[in-house]
Image (cartoon, helix red, strand yellow):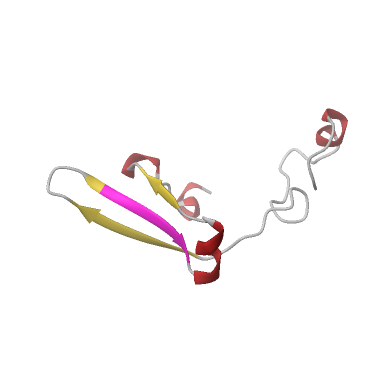
Amino acid sequence: MSTGSHRDWGRLPRDPDPESDLGYQLLELDVLRSSDGADEHILVLPSDENMLRENAFMVVDPDSIRDLETMV
């Protein structure tokens, strides 16, 4: 689903499928952790190196990381 009107969003199921309903593409991610002694740093990178050219990476606070498999 591309961006659309409020009416389009109302047609989605209550628990939409990320790929078919919302148009998300699942991808493999590598999570790299490092520490400078005081703070932990986490870098989340796509496994596909070509995506790095598209700035497809995140630098996040450790408290922001969630294991979705354990949350379901």
**Is 4 or 53 nearer to us in this picture?**
53
Residue 48 visible somewhere in the drawing: no
**Is 72 or 42 nearer to us in this picture?**
42
Range of the magenta residues? Answer: 41-46
Q: Position of residue 17 (x, y in %)?
A: 72, 51
Q: Position of residue 11 (x, y in %)?
A: 86, 37
Q: Is residue 70 left or right of residue 51?
A: left
State yes or no: residue 44 in magenta.
yes
Q: Is residue 38 left or right of residue 45?
A: left
Q: Residue at x 52, y 56 (%)?
A: 56
Is 21 located above or below residue 64 in the figure?
below
Q: Residue at x 12, y 48 (%)?
A: 37
Q: Residue at x 49, y 55 (%)?
A: 69
Residue 26 visible somewhere in the drawing: yes
Is 59 located above or below residue 45 in the figure?
above
Q: Position of residue 35 (x, y in %)?
A: 19, 52
Magenta stretch: helix, strand or loop mostly: strand
**Is 71 or 26 nearer to us in this picture?**
26
Image label count: 0
State yes or no: residue 42 in magenta.
yes
Q: Is residue 17 left or right of residue 68?
A: right
Return the residue found at the far left: 37
Return the residue found at the far top: 6
